[in-house]
Amino acid sequence: MFFNPFPRAILRLALAFLAVATPLAARQSEPSKASGVFTFKSYGGDQGLTTLSVTVMTQDQTGFLWVGTEDGLFRYDGESFHRFGTKDGLADTYIYALAPAPDGSLWVLTKEGLARFQDGAFRVMPAATGLPKAENLLHNGSAMACDGQSRLWITTSEGLFEGGPSGFWRVKGLPDDVMSCVWINPLGGQVLTASFSGRLFRSKPEGGWEETRLPAPLDKNGVLAVVEDPEGRTWARGNGTLVRFARDWKEPPKDFSKAMNLLTIRDAFLSVDAKGRVWVPTQAGVGCFQGDTHHLLDESWGLPGNWANCALVDREGSLWVGSEGVHRALGRMLWTSSTRHQGLPSDTVWSVARTQGGLTWAGTQAGLVRSDPSGWRLVPETKGQAISAIAPDGRGGLWATGASTGAWHVAPSGQASWVAFPGPANVQIQAMSLGPDGTLWAAGGTGPLWRVPVDGSPEIERVGAFGDVSVQVFSVLATKAAVFVSTDHGLAVRERTGWRVLGAKDGLKSSNCQALAMTPSGDVWMSYGDTHGLSILRASEGHWAVVEKMVAVPALAQDSIVSMAFDAAGRLWLGTGHGVKCWNGQTCLRYGRGDGLPGEDADGNAIWADESSVWVGLSNGLARFDVAGLREAVPPPSVRILEVRDGGDRVLNLDGGLQAVRYPFRTMDFDFAALTFVDESRVHLQVRLQGFEDQWRDSKSRESRYTALPPGSYRFEVRAAVGDGPFGNSDTFDFRILAPWWRTWWFYGLCFLFGSVLVLASIRWRTAVLEGRNRQLEALVKARTLDLERANEQLQESSMLDALTGLKNRRYLGMNLPEEEGRVLRAIRTIQASGRQPQGEDLVFLLVDLDHFKVVNDEHGHAAGDAVLKLAAEAIRSATRDTDTVARWGGEEFLIVARRADRQTADVIARKILDEVKGREYPLPGGGALRLTCSIGFSAFPVLMGEPGAFGWEEVVEIADQCLYAAKRTGRDAFVGVYLEGSEVPADLAARLLSELPSLVAAGSLVLRTSIPAYRPLDWKRGH
């Protein structure tokens, strides 16, 4: 009667049986395999999802993704999964059902009962709330749902119940029968529920319930899930059955049970997304039903694994599938890709086009293919040939060419015939275009141009404007008004009066012209091979001229554009070396691997756009974009502050109004998350602390720290954007740093009283001249002593700074690092005593040496060397955090001490320093500028987690120094770092560490992080 899950052993046995039994049913209306496959990103232990047996998924009102498993509940915040278990308030860790509420709370159904998550904590519903006992609750994924008032509806063996934290009651008008499932329309609030006695119920707007009988076998086996699509049709599912009722429930339901294998391993889930698609996870994949069409998303379509327990489309339009782990379809399922695994003869696609009848053609490095319902079919005559250009012939066929002087004419059936072109032999045809009159224009890569009239013989077209200059052709575009040929010597245009060549003198940005495309209005857009940006050409009185040198959109001028096309809606699609871009006239969207493309290196002229799709040829495959499914850009991401801690490690209440922080604990830590999952790697975070800083600043991590804040009121703000998109609304946290006791009103009062007493005493003191003179002398001595003390303090402070760069010096490190070393040791021992592993408490030492700096002094003088040293110090300082210490170690060497760092990400700091030093110019006093590189060695303190005090910071610097010399000896402009992981190490390692570092690295006893390629062995010898 109750839907308890299979044990794991039975689950594995069932999956093994399904792999060799039960063939899949026919997939009605399934798209052609030539459309490509979807790309999924899988989430597991690396992201914190430590239990991979997923039972249920949902997204709450805030935007967090919740994943229920057999051993805990997990919340995904866009970076990692956080686990909740019995220690967090859950009664049990086997999660059966989840129900998010509009008020931001989340209801969780476990084996031991019901719990509610609110304000960061779980509360188990006691038995006194009116619910039946836990064993009488229906343990399946569709057992509960929330309405618009955040009331929970839950199925039990005693009927359907409704309520909230204050209590539950049985819903009136329904039988006291076993209710198997419930679903609530998030828009209209209509409730659907079903009983095991074969009855389906729907709430009426005016009150009461509408009822219908379920068809066999649902009337006896029970309905496990129900939903309603946007057209008001009701879908009901059992294990192996699926039916759809009309809006009015008057007609017999349509049976989809034979559409595909609908059996399940656990519960029979249903979900409906904003597009009206009904998602049906099964033991054979995920079924997608829309109207009367459907198809099965399985391994052949890119789904990891051949089964699914649950499916969810989030509010950004991304499909999530729960099975063995969690998998997300990249790019909101708008992009599909084809490679050799999908039938292409090669992953490199040089050209793509579509012909009448919907056939898609792709020219690859190993032949020409065309689409059919089963996938890609190779044109036999082109096997092994690199097809560099293709063009439809306007009659359903195609022209295709490669490395010989001529082209294949391919009929719609796929039969190809070779047509030889006159002129020099073995000329690679670079580009082709069919004019509106049916004339084919073909251009060789080294300049020859041919025209092939309809039913005529190929002829060589002379472009006299080039003279005897040898040109490199990139693209050809034939329009009704003219023929355009882009070359490295300008743009050749064939007008009514003949050929002429446009160059920089005619308004082009450069004479190295590349991709061409015509807008629906007849303008021609062009990109360049040696500069970024676009130019627009327009005809005026029969002559073409540049009307705009560059589209005033920065996102269009950041990459080299190798291909472009306009779709039927007038959107511009660009192929670049960093992915595909789409510009709709207002915003520019970039698509890459994170959106489902097989690669990001687009090939020249390999693009095709029409009313239904966009095809892009890449070095790694062929990508297809579903224009029909294109929605508006994803709205800017929202952010949430997850936790705020003060210097006393006290977690502050996020919803408690203005929070007060005592002065000794005025160091503040903020953890936050950007709730967007479309492409987590492109999230751009910014933070600001009003009252301390006025400008937003970028945050590379999802945490921010402010140390030693002065007393006052502050507001912390965080916001996020995706890529170059706009920022969303910020989340804020208000707090106040209390003043110390010596800056309070009562202390000022005491000071005033004390001052009054002093004034009275001074009046009496002055009555005695001799006593007054003595006090004056004492005051003078005291003042001069104070001046001497201040001078000594200033001298001591200046002795800790490097006179040239203004950075800290060795004396400063020697006086301050022992105290910092002690702080780290105390923190690590405290954490280890609690049974946890220290994270983010390391001191990372990075020793930086400027490469070939002696040459600067020798060739330009010591004054130039000093100037370059100052600039290099500024570059290194800008690449580090505010909490890090940068010191001049000696000569051209610098030492960076990164506090509260993680040794596992120290290479990120080193790489940032390398890039910052290398990316700057260093002006010389006498004119001119230099480029510098540097070498970096790094290690972390404590060296041994098991014995934190075994090595001091000086030994860590010695290890970093050995790594530095290895980087310099192996090639410079690189970093080398080593560190130990874990607390258990060989007994003799500590004694060998400093003297035998290279051999320990070679033996794998130490973790090595280096930017030097693996094929170049490290040279650990010291000396120059």
Image (cartoon, rainbow, N blue to C red):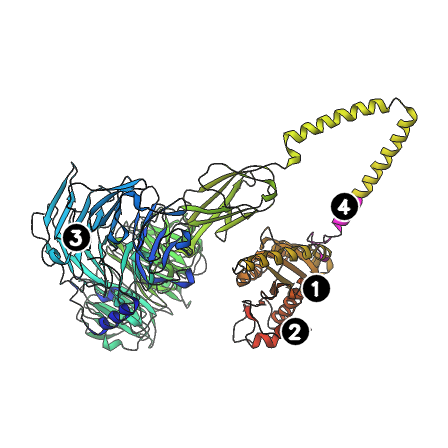
User: Label 1 sits on what residue type?
Assistant: Glu
Q: Which residue is mark 1?
A: 859
Q: Is residue 191 above or below residue 889?
A: above
Q: Which residue is mark 2?
A: 991
Q: Secondary structure at mark 4?
A: helix
User: Label 3 sits on what residue type?
Assistant: Trp
Quarter of the image holding residue 187? Answer: top left
**Lateral position of residue 360 relative to residue 868, left or right:** left
Q: Which residue is mark 3?
A: 235
**Is label 1 or label 4 in front?**
4
Q: Which residue is mark 4?
A: 794
Crowding near the residue tagged with mark 3, few <14, some 14–19, many ≥20 C-alpha atoms within 10 Å: many
**Is label 3 or label 2 in front?**
2
CB-based contact (under 8 Å), mark 1 and mark 2: no
| Residue 360 rendering spot, x and y as whole percentages | 23, 65
- Which contiguous range is marked in magenta? 791-810
Residue 407 is covered by the magenta coloring: no
Crowding near the residue tagged with mark 4, few <14, some 14–19, many ≥20 C-alpha atoms within 10 Å: few
Residue 803 is covered by the magenta coloring: yes
Distance, label 1 to label 2, CA atoms, is 44 Å
Q: Secondary structure at mark 2?
A: helix
Image quarter hosting the C terminus: bottom right
Crowding near the residue tagged with mark 1, few <14, some 14–19, many ≥20 C-alpha atoms within 10 Å: few
Of the two numbered discs 3 and 2 on the same chain, state the one appearing first in sequence: 3
Image quarter hosting the N terminus: bottom left
Quarter of the image holding residue 385? Answer: bottom left
CB-based contact (under 8 Å), mark 3 and mark 2: no
Q: Secondary structure at mark 3?
A: strand
Distance, label 4 to label 3, CA atoms, is 81 Å
